[in-house]
Amino acid sequence: MAEPAMLPRIAGQADAATSSAPTSGIAPRGAIRLEGISRVFGGGVVAVDRIDLDIQAGEFFTLLGPSGCGKTTLLRMIAGFETPDAGRILISGREMQSVPPHKRPVNTVFQSYALFPHLSVAENIGFGLRMRGVARPERLARTEQIMALLQIDAFARRNPAQLSGGQRQRVALARALVNEPEVVLLDEPLSALDAKLRAELQVELMRMQKRLGMTFIFVTHDQHEALVMSDRIAVMEQGRMLQVGPVLDVYEQPRSVFVAEFLGLSNIWKFTPRPGNMAETAIGALSIATPITTQRTAMIRPEKIWLYPEADAPRDRPNMFAGVVREAIYMGASTQYNVALAGGAIVLALDTNNQAAERSWGPGERVVLELKPANIMLIDG
Amino acid sequence: MSQNLAPPIRRALLLTSLPVYGLLYAPLALIAVFSFAPAPGSTTAGLHWYNDLLHAPDVLAALRRSLTLALGSSILGTALGTLMGFGLSRFRSRARSGFAAALPSLIIYTPIIMPSLVFGISELIFFNLMHKATGLFAAGLLTMGIAHVTFQAPYVALVVFARMAGLDPNLFEASHDLYANGRQSFLYLTVPVIRPAIIGGFLLAFTLSIDDFTISYFTAGPGSTTLPIYIYSAVARKGISPDINALATLMIATVIGIGLLQYGFTRQKDRQTVPRTGD
Amino acid sequence: MSAITGGASIQGSAERAERLARAWRLWMTAGPGLFWIVVFLLLPSLILLGIGFFSIGNYGNPHLPLSLEPMREVAGYSILGWSPDNLATILRSLLQAISAAGLTILLAYPVVFFIITRPPALRPLLLLFVILPSWTNQVVRTYAWMELLGPGSTLSHLAQGAGLIPPHLGLMPGILAMQIGLTYNYLPYMVVPLYAAAEKLDWSLVEAGRDLYASGRRLFWSAVFPQTIPGLLSGIILVAIPAFGDYVVPTLLGGGKSMMIGSLIASQFLDTPNWPYGAALTIFMLIFTCAGLIVFRVMSKRLGSSEGSMI
């Protein structure tokens, strides 16, 4: 399992966050551009609301959001199963709105896998090649190659009903990858699997994507999965894209309360600015490193809070708060402390357990928290 | 749970059910027994009456007509019914309600719930009027076939619809995603996947056609006596007779045979779709 | 989800286009079959109903002007004055249909509970053996009972010996034979829906009831029977409606004396034609049928039974 704050994998995009793709039409194979995409369902429900997005060729891009945020609808519009009401979809520079799904250079891995029950594993994988009229010898060769790559060649003759969940997932992936599409769309493909298998397949998906160099668009509501796997993520809510950027940026510098809360744990306070770049919050005055302009919300991640035993706490630093541990939630690699401050406010702090023997606290014990000014992020609104 | 009823209750259920099973098969068995009755002037039981059937041109002609009618109407009825079951399952939007959305269901259920006498008489009058007006639709195998298709197609549609309802709707999207156009998707995904339902529907349509008397009787013409009509008029004319026993026995055996075959098909389908877990 | 703020005119156009495409595909697939049924059944049955409001011509053919004469005839009025025969026939058919439903219920319950107390793998087969006879031709099935109940049969001899019927007569033709024929023919139509309901039986309620009720009989009526009512209602519909309008059984087993509505209607189109009168009788029959359907449908809706994967 990867650590929560892991290394970002930025695949050579210079200014991905600002997303300015070439408009000349000579877009690289596998690049996707959405311009003003909207989709309204019956009864005036806006599923996708004027979305602009550029996805680089070869990128592992994740659409993250709660259920009903429009991420699946957006994916289905790229696949061609839904038509946008307005806007343009370009794949590798070609306009796609009027292209039916079977003529798009994309393949989908469905949440339910959607393996054809009447075909064997090998026939399932070869289906796309067969429909495109690829000659049998080449079809078999490519099918075998991808089965070997995904280590499912042992089940080639089996019926999908005879496979376990993880095996079905691999077959669904192979069935998409064997066609060497420009873009692979994955609609919560791991959500039906148990945690351990899921972690394994996350790594495998990433490895496969890097190896084949295809663009992957991954839809999930699981923020941990998004953090682990993606180059860039887009956080969606109510049909809108709240923030797009490299994983590290979105996690470390959320631009809205929703993003901060949806992605990982956070402590968030409204504040009133005070002279000396101070912020008056519910837990007291905080010294902030970033110049305060119009922002009125402060946020700090629990793992960015330092804990000290009451006796050893440094005296001469800003933003030191004494409190009592309410709950200590042991999570293996780390422990989450819910600390009640003097005023009654609860602050979440996360401590890695690399020195648990010397440093750990139980409920009722007194601790001192340090919220380093540089670690406090400011959010608009 | 259902199996741990008290033994006396289980025994009572067995003892009351066996006579009912007996009641269901006794009349049919009796016909079969009587069909082996000895020929007139003889005392040895045997296949005399079956032999008679083989040399009765009326019976053979009626059999031929029955088979032609059943086969022809089943093929058309299965085609129309399959398309209906498939189309209604795939393309009717589930979100909408009201009369327009319910109309196809109402139409499909009409032939099933309409009493067969009313069905038959409606057809009789309709074909009669049409014949007077256009000269077409003279009562005969054609009009019988049209009527049979009308009640076969809804049953086939129900069977196919039930199979479709058990499928993951993503399957069809997956086929399009994998470069199949509408025709390819239907031929390489839909048809193979619902094949057990199509075959089952065809066998059902066939038995329905062979089994039907009332509707056939009202749509038949002078030269289109099928087996059930032949038996009916023979029975109405001369009551019970050993040659009818033999003919009835053959029909019973055929239908029970097809029934068991159809059961086999649906069972096989069940086995295929039972998911198994573990590596 | 957020409301639309701009570009409202183009919003929703994709939905409309998709709906149109779906409707087009629906009509391309389901259209031919639906069209077939409309042309060859709905239209003819409407014509039949319409004929019930025409005058009766010299040869029993429908004639203009429109009239209620056929309806009066159904009610029993003719040139000879009023006679109760028609109403008696309708009433008799109704009673026969209801008692056929009652008899099938009595026979079906033990069978259904016998089947569901067997191992699951065996149940479909046991059910199949109840259904199989109904797949044979109705004429053949009815014919079989002629053999069993005819004047020379063992059963008739027994009945003669017991003094139930006069010597030299059989149990057939007659009302009893007709009742047996209807019950036999429609028994599977009661077993199947009842089985469907009984298979879903919540046995935990029965277990709970075991502690509350001393006798098995009270346990059955309070914990088991209520759960089978939806199946029972469908069964009654499936048995009573076709039994009410049956043509084969009354003709072959009933004999001339016990005319039923089915044979009465048929004779208006076959023997001595009187189409408007026959059509009027049909309207009456359909009114009874529909009324029965609606009553039972409302009842089963009240009981919250669901239709599952029905079209």
Image (cartoon, grey):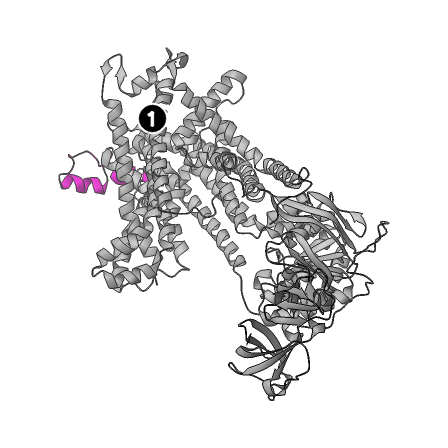
- For the residue pair B132 and B104, the one nearer the viewer reads as B104
Report the side of C16 relative to B26 (left or right). Answer: right
Report the side of A118 relative to B48 (left or right). Answer: right
User: Is A177 placed above or below B97 here?
Assistant: below
| Quadrant of the rendered image containing residue A329 | bottom right
How far across and how far down the image is residue B121, in percent?
41, 26
Residue type of the residue flagged with mark 1: Phe
Crowding at label 1, few (<14), some or many (≥20) Cα neighbours within 10 Å?
Answer: some
Report the side of A329 relative to B227 (left or right). Answer: right
- For the residue pair C172 and B11, the one nearer the viewer reads as B11
Q: Residue at x 61, y 52 (%)?
A: B170
Secondary structure beneath dot 1 equals helix
User: Is B165 placed above or below C118 here?
Assistant: above
| Quadrant of the rendered image containing residue A302 | bottom right
- Highlighted range, magenta: C143-172
**Which residue is disc 1 drawn over?**
C284
How far across and how far down the image is residue B154, in percent?
49, 38
Q: Is residue A284 visible?
A: yes
How far across and how far down the image is residue B122, in percent?
43, 25
